[in-house]
Image: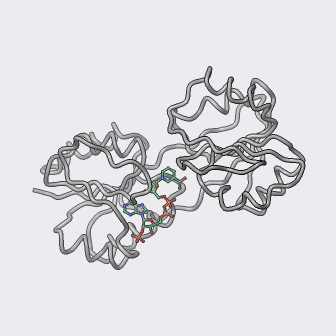
Amino acid sequence: MKRVLLLGGTGDALQIARQLGPQHVYSLAGLGRVPQGLACAVRVGGYGGSDGLARFIESEGIALVIDATHPYAAQMSANAAAACRRAHVPCWALRRAGWTAQAGDDWRMVGGWDALADAIRPFRRVLFTSGREPLAHLDEIPAHQFWIVRCLDAHPGNERARIIDARGPFDIDGERALFALNRIDVLVTKNSGGEATRAKLDVARELRVPVVMMRRPALPEVDREFDSPAQLLRAMNEESGVL
Ligand code: NAP
């Protein structure tokens, strides 16, 4: 029976993990909540780079690695592809499509923190929905700005930043209230794709609020790519002995 290593940390990965039997391993970095009630084994923590991951694949008799990490978890995706090459096992990846700008959107693409800081400089009330990175820059908030940072962290914030520790999905009414209450005039986000966190873009369009969008990182080539958990699970079903 083939043993699968599923690299996760996303809602899509959890959907796949729920379908895995006890011989398979669901792997998490350990930053968020560890899900309960899964039939498969759950492993928490890094491997010490691609060499460590290759050693784990070999010693645990893993026959297939599925990279279902977040599209911005580029380091882990690179490690997975390199480790699979070294260990001679196939690497499949769930690569969820990004959002695309629609009529009425004002998206400003940026590639890193310095470009992001420049892009938000004209604005006063910034909503970050791009993860924890802004927490490392709270001492650099310009005098004319107030930041609202929504991320998975119970950070206390400071006099010019409020941190909202919240996990999606987020609906449109909640997002409208968030923008209105905080008088948001610019949104910063990653292009995560999917439905769970898309409503903020709909609200930004309604209110004509510009969006500073962090570009997706380049990801490695893999043996097979899928754009939804359902498509990936179908392929696993078709491969004898995987599910
Ligand atoms: P990253 O920069 O690509 O990875 C950093 C290191 O974390 C990796 O080198 C690896 O450590 C460890 N790691 C990452 N994913 C792992 C996994 N599934 N299982 C075991 N170890 C893992 O990743 P990140 O951007 O910090 O994201 C960390 C986790 O959060 C990922 O699993 C990702 O799916 C999830 N996530 C990320 C984002 C985002 O915006 N980046 C958003 C939502 C969820 P070693 O080198 O020691 O093996």
Residue drawn at x 30%, y 55% as measured from the top left:
6
In the picture, which quadrant includes the N terminus? bottom left
Residue 41: give x, y in percent of width and height.
Answer: 20, 54
Instruction: Name, please, the residue furthest toward the top.
Output: 173
Assign ligand 1 to one image quadrant.
bottom left
The quadrant holding residue 193 is top right
Near-viewer residue (145 or 40): 145
Instruction: Name, please, the residue furthest toward the left.
Output: 1
Near-viewer residue (71 or 130): 130
Residue 241 falls left or right of residue 6: left
Residue 235: give x, y in percent of width and height.
Answer: 27, 45
Residue drawn at x 76%, y 42% as measured from the top left:
107
> How many badges with numbers are in the image?
0
Near-viewer residue (63 or 166): 166
Compared to residue 152, the image places residue 59 above or below, namely below
Residue 106 falls left or right of residue 61: right
Residue drawn at x 59%, y 51% as measured from the top left:
155
The quadrant holding residue 170 is top right
